[in-house]
Amino acid sequence: MPISVRPLEPRDLDVVTRVLTGSWGGSTVMAVGRGEMVDAARLPGFVAHLGGDVAGVLTYADRGDAVEVITIDAVIPGKGVGRALLDAVRGVAAGRGAARLWLMTTNDNTHALRFYQRYGFDLVALHRHAADEARRLKPAIPAESDGIPIRHYLELELPLRAAGPARA
């Protein structure tokens, strides 16, 4: 069964809110790149369907010369939904001439780290104790997952255009 992906529309607000609430405890999430809370349900993004079912949602934000993935949720895992959503936002970012697509994840999220690196993302920064700081703004962020303390954010990026020649 093929996955269909389309841009989010105003009529998707309830679906997006439901998916975000299931994954994040609400639609308000920490945008670590900006150090602030954002209502991800109000951001641009994509919804994926598998058959007639919602299979996933991705939200993003323009950051000048880059596009940041704010949330990505595959409701139906293991079917290529995450890849299809990343393909869609990558297309938007490349079409806008962005230099990179980037995102943050926490140090405990080993499944996501594997997925992103297999997609082509590279680990470019460790934001030590950023999860502790984020927890001050959103106390619902858990302190641990699978027995791993959640302390840090890892920044990953996917370059979208070749680097220019080195300058002297």
Image (cartoon, rainbow, N blue to C red):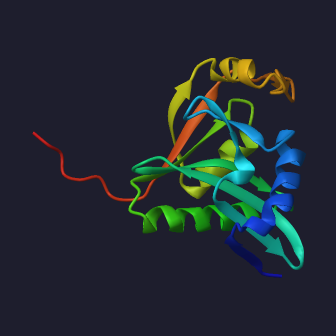
Would you identify the image quadrant in which residue 77 lies? bottom right
Q: Is residue 153 above or below residue 76?
A: above
Labels in figure, total: 0
> Along the horizontal axis of the image, is 159 left or right of 57?
left
Quadrant of the drawing holding the N terminus: bottom right
Query: Front-most of 155 and 65?
Result: 65
> Residue 83 at what x, y percent from top left?
67, 63
Would you identify the image quadrant in which residue 155 lies? top right
Q: Residue furthest front?
A: 10
> Does the rendering let one see residue 29?
yes
At 32% from the left and 57% from the top, the residue drawn is 162
At 87% from the left and 79% from the top, the residue drawn is 51
At 86% from the left and 59% from the top, the residue drawn is 14
Query: Front-most of 111 and 127?
Result: 127
> Along the horizontal axis of the image, is 90 left or right of 65?
right
> Does the rendering let one see residue 80?
no
Q: Residue furthest bottom?
A: 1
Quadrant of the drawing holding the C terminus: top left
Query: Front-most of 162 and 12?
Result: 12
> Along the horizontal axis of the image, is 108 left or right of 163?
right
> Residue 60 at what x, y percent from top left?
61, 53
Q: Is residue 81 above or below residue 105?
A: below
> Residue 166 at what x, y percent from top left?
18, 45
